[in-house]
Amino acid sequence: MPHDHGHGHIDPESGDRRVSIAIWANALLTVAQIVGGLLSGSLALIADALHNFSDMASLVIAFGARKIARRPADERMTFGYGRIEIVAALINYTTLILIGFYLIYEGGMRMIDPPEVAGWTVVILGGVALAVDTLTALLTYSMQKGSVNIRALFLHNLSDALASVAVIIGGALIILYDMRWVDPAITIGIALYILYLAFTEIGGPIRTLMLGSPPDIDNGAVVDAVRGIAGVADIHHAHFWQMQEHAAALDTHVVIETASWERLEDIKDEIKRMLESQFGIAHSTLEFERQERAHQNASLYGHGGKEDAG
């Protein structure tokens, strides 16, 4: 059955405006949090600021990627520019991982010798950050369902919003009970959550860039369906991959029964219609072989032969 990828029904210009608003909001918030963190002595606030700064950088990267991805294919990029959004997502997740490890290091150092922290400054700026993070998450929520690029941004913002809640709680505990160790402890907690999100999501972009099979397609079912078409004897050298995030593709050799060779064009049309209607594979490159002249001992996947396996 066709796959529903849940694309957001937002026109590109409207989506660009949302991302632009989020960029400016995060830029202003980052400056305010860094200044506030330095004045108050709060590492958790600076940690949240660094996370917001990574969000701003991610938003800028994503904004540029959205623009570039809409360019048509040309002589230099014959597959088009759609994969730039996959690259942008990989960059964003990588920055999250680097920031997460840095914050764990800084938080550990401050756990040893917790500094004085101005609790009210932390609470006030944490509240402002929560408002901005919530706004940004809402702006990108409906867009993230159909784009790994925007999903990376949404997860940035969602983790920011949760981190801001933690910062506010930490500031309140410092005000009420002078629990200075809470600030670096919350920093480490934020960092661990950032790492969890990044490591959970980074596999998707890596898989796509490595030409991995589309995760929502059952390769075996596709192979069986092609083999089940009248006139098809077998298939081999199948390559399942993604041109872009939601553009599944199949390149394969199809062995045609000798008696059905005259029906080649009809068989090809039937295969292509079936691939698109049942599996959402709109791009397929099929190479046909007569049964008596087909490759011998060919592997089902890849270019090798069965004797090369292992």
Image (cartoon, grey):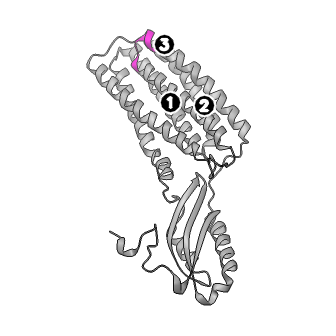
Q: Residue at x 41, y 40 (%)?
A: 196
The CA distance from mark 3 to mark 1 is 17 Å
Mark 2 crowd level (few <14, some 14–19, many ≥20, 10 Å Cα): many
Q: In this rendered view, identify the residue nearer to me: 226 or 4.
A: 226
128 vs 172, nearest the viewer: 128
Crowd around label 3: few <14 · some 14–19 · many ≥20 (10 Å): many
Q: Is residue 304 left or right of residue 2?
A: left
Query: Does residue 53 lie above or below 280 as drawn?
Result: above
Q: Are marks 3 and 2 in contact (CB under 8 Å)?
A: no
Q: Which is more N-terminal, label 1 or label 3?
A: 3
Whole-percent x, y for residue 177 in the image: 36, 15
Structural crowding at the residue carrying mark 1, measured as other residues with C-alpha within 10 Å and reported as few (<14), some (14–19) or many (≥20): many
User: For the residue labelled by badge 2, is the local secondary structure a helix, a strand or a loop?
Assistant: helix
Frontmost residue, 301 versus 273: 301
Asked if 169 appears above or below 295 in the picture, the reply is above
Question: Which image quarter: residue 118?
Answer: top left
- Work out how far the residue at label 2 is from the one at label 1, CA to CA, in angstroms: 10 Å
Q: Position of residue 224 (x, y in %)?
A: 53, 76
Give the magenta part as a residue range: 37-43
Q: Is residue 197 magenta?
A: no
Q: Amino acid at mark 2?
A: Thr
Tell me whether circle 3 and circle 1 mark residues in contact (CB < 8 Å): no
Label 2, on which residue?
136
Q: Residue at 64%, 32% (x, y): give it.
A: 19
For the N terminus, the image quarter is: bottom right
Residue behind mark 1: 160
Q: Tags 2 and 1 in contact by the CB under 8 Å rule?
A: yes
Give the number of the disc on residue 36: 3
Q: Is residue 40 magenta?
A: yes
N-terminal of the pair, mark 3 or mark 2, is 3
In this image, 249 relative to 101: left or right? Answer: right
Secondary structure beneath dot 1 equals: helix
